[in-house]
Image: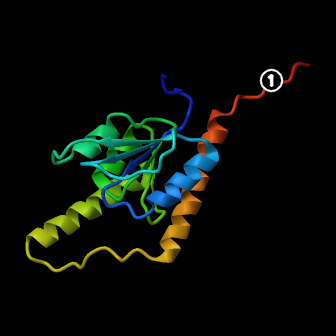
């Protein structure tokens, strides 16, 4: 069965994603297919909408798999900023597990800050790690995912016929 090109697909960068269960529930409620992509085997619910992809153990195998497929009208869930950047450039919506959307307007600065922090850490600066995942992050994520789905559905809705008069 070929996938419906007009159907939004949710791609999950799954190795360290803390909101997989929430994604499954929202996707099933909306009838959207989900590709759960990890370096190796990962458990997923037995549901025809949810597919498990073992992309391989290469350095960026899962990222490359997602970036090679996600496009306009799709949603990518990732905390990986370079992957989010690639997906946004291809027209996909990208959302971090804490609910932060990556957009064309924000991705450049987000990537620059990430690179700066990487450089500081590699030069011995102690910069601390990411904030721990909190319940409010889960709530913000659910809201951001729902908003993204609704926005895409509005954009794909058939245009009403022009008034004839």
Q: Quadrant of the C terminus?
A: top right
> Outermost residue, left direction?
123
**Residue 149 left/right relative to 79:** right
> Outermost residue, front direction?
46
Instruction: Say if 80 sits above or below 4 in the image.
Output: below
Q: Which residue is mark 1?
A: 162
**Residue 53 left/right relative to 122:** right
**Residue 68 left/right relative to 7:** left
Instruction: Say if 36 sits above or below 98 in the image.
Output: above
Front-lying residue, 69 or 151? 69
SS class of the residue under badge 1? loop
Image quadrant in which you'd find residue 15: bottom left
- Residue 128: x, y in percent? 24, 79
User: In the image, what residue occupies the spot 49% across and 63% down?
Assistant: 99
Front-lying residue, 101 or 17? 17
Instruction: Say if 6 sits above or below 48 in the image.
Output: above
- Residue 38: x, y in percent? 30, 49
- Residue 159: x, y in percent? 72, 28
User: In the image, what residue occupies the spot 60% across and 54% down?
Assistant: 146
Instruction: Say if 22 sits above or below 74 in the image.
Output: below
How would you rate the neighbour count of disc 1 (Cα within 10 Å): few for under 14, some for 14-19, many for 20 or more? few
User: In the image, what residue occupies the spot 44% across and 58% down?
Assistant: 20
Front-lying residue, 146 or 48? 48
> Outermost residue, top direction?
164
């Amino acid at each position: 069965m070929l996938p419906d090109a007009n159907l939004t697909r949710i791609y999950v960068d799954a190795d360290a994603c803390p909101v997989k269960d929430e994604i499954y529930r929202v996707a099933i409620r909306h009838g959207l297919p989900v590709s759960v992509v990890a370096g190796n085997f990962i458990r997923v619910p037995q549901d025809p909408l949810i597919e498990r992809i073992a992309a391989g153990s290469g350095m960026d195998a899962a990222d490359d798999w997602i970036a090679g497929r996600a496009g306009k009208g799709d949603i990518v869930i990732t905390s990986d900023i370079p992957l989010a950047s690639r997906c946004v450039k291809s027209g996909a919506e990208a959302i971090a597990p804490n609910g932060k959307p990556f957009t064309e307007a924000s991705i450049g600065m987000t990537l620059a800050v990430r690179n700066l922090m990487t450089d500081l850490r590699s030069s011995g600066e102690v910069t601390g790690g990411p904030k721990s995942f909190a319940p409010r992050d889960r709530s913000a994520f659910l809201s951001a995912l729902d908003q993204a789905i609704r926005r895409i559905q509005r954009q794909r809705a058939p245009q009403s016929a022009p008034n004839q008069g």
